[in-house]
């Protein structure tokens, strides 16, 4: 629907669609850590286990896969 109106709305509000595009591009995505924790929940890990692991993971800067691997390694050690 936006694509159909894009050329027609420029006359009325020329900056409206530019601003909307900018907002969508700057929208913060879920952090890699949050995605990893959600994936671990989906695998059946309970919140108690995830709360123990989270402080160790927050110090890292990894991809979602990296966080999952680190979390599993830490859970196996303890």
Image: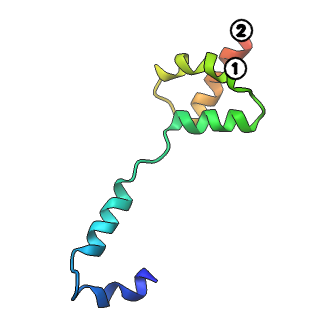
Residue 74 place in picture, x, y as percent = 66, 15
Residue, disc 1: 49
Left or right of 9 in this view: 43: right
- Seen at 50% across and 44% down, the residue is 30
Distance from Cα at disc 1 to Cα at disc 2: 10 Å
- Seen at 57% across and 21% down, the residue is 54
Which scheme is used to colour this image of the protein? rainbow
Eye-nearest disc, 1 or 2 = 1
Residue 62 place in picture, x, y as percent = 50, 30
Disc sitting over residue 78 in the figure: 2
Instruction: Tell me the crowding category of disc 2: few under 14, some 14 to 19, or many 20 or more residues within 10 angstroms, Cα based.
Output: few
| The image quarter in which residue 36 lies | top right
Residue 16 place in picture, x, y as percent = 27, 74
Residue 60 place in picture, x, y as percent = 48, 22
Q: Secondary structure at mark 2?
A: loop
Q: Is residue 53 above or below residue 25?
A: above
| The image quarter in which residue 24 lies | bottom left
């Amino acid at each position: 629907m936006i694509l159909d109106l894009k050329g027609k709305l420029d006359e009325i509000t020329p900056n409206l669609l530019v601003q909307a595009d900018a907002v969508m591009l700057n929208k913060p995505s879920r952090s890699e850590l949050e995605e990893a924790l959600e994936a671990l929940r989906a695998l059946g890990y309970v919140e108690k286990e995830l709360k123990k692991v989270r402080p160790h993971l927050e110090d890292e800067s990894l991809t979602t896969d990296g966080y999952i691997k680190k979390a599993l390694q830490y859970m196996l050690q303890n």
